[in-house]
Amino acid sequence: MILAHIQIAVNRRDMPAFIEEDLFMANQTYLNKQGLTVKDLVTIGIFTALLWVTMLIGGLPLAPNPVTTFYMPLSAALLGGPVFLLLVAKVPKRGPIALAGILIGIIWFAAGMHWAMDLGYVLGSILGDFLAGTKKYKSVKMNILAYICLSLGCTGSYLCFFADPVTWGSYMLEGGTSASYIDTMNAAAQGWMPYAILLGTVAVAAFSGWVGSRLLKKQFAKAGITA
C-alpha cells in the first residue's frame, strides 16, 4: 500500500505541466457545478427582478385602496409562477430561491413596506428552497410548493395588522402612511380575513405555479424536471 502511494506521487511529479493544468481546470469546473457560479448569480438577479415586477403589477390594483389592500398577497402571487419555475429550472441548485426571496424582501423594505412582509419573504424563500431541494429541484410539485411558501411572505404584514392593529398602525404612520388610510383599514377589517388571505394566497400561488408548469413543459423536460 505504501509503495503504491509512493508510485502515485512519482507519477504525478512526472506529469507534463499541461496535464496537471487540465486536471486543475477540471477540478475547478466540478467545484463550480456544486455551487453558484457568476452566471448563476446573474441569472438569479435577472429573474428576481422579473419576479418582483410580477408582484408589483399584480399588487398595484389592490394595494393603494385601504379596503382591497388586504387581498394584495393574492394578486401579487398571480403572475409570478412561470417566472419562479423557470428560475428553478435554469439554476437547479441550493440557494437561488432563498437569494431571490432575500432580495425581494430587501426591495420591499426599501420601498417602505412593513418589516413583517420583508421578513416573510426571507423566511418563506428559505423554507421553499429547503423543500424544493429535498427533490433536488427536479419535482414540479415541490417547486410549486416552494413558490407558495415564497408567496405567503407577502401575508406577513397583514397578519401583523390583525395581531396588533395599534402597533402596526404606529409603525406605518412613521413610515409615511396616512392616518386616513389606516383608519379605513381598521374599519374594513373583519375577523375572517386572515384565513381568507392565507388560504387565498395558497390557492392563487398554486394556480400560478400550475399555469407555469403547463407553459414551460418543454423546458422542464429538457432540464429533467418531473411531476
Image (cartoon, rainbow, N blue to C red):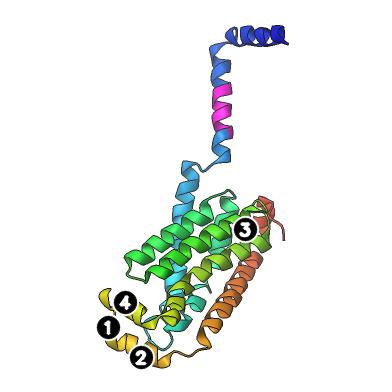
Do the numbered discs 4 and 3 sit on residues whose CB atoms are within 8 Å?
no
Tag 2 or tag 4, which sits nearer the N-term?
4
Q: Which residues are magenta?
A: 23-30
Mark earlier in primary sequence (4, 3): 3
**Which element carries disc 1, helix, strand or loop?**
loop
The residue lying toward the viewer, choosing from 212 and 189, is 189
Q: CA distance from mark 2 to mark 3?
A: 38 Å
Taking the spot 41% from the left edge, 66% from the top edge, the residue there is 118
User: Which numbered disc covers residue 22?
Assistant: none
Amino acid type for the residue under numbered disc 3: Leu
Residue 80, above or below 67: above
Image point (68%, 53%), residue name: 135
Q: CA distance from mark 1 to mark 4?
A: 8 Å
Separation of residues labelled 4 and 3 (CA atoms): 33 Å
* Residue type, label 4: Met
Disc assigned to residue 131: 3
Mark 1 vs 4: CB contact within 8 A = no
Residue under label 1, please give it. 178
Callout 2: SS: helix
Which residue, given by chain and number where applicable, does mark 2 sit on?
A: 184
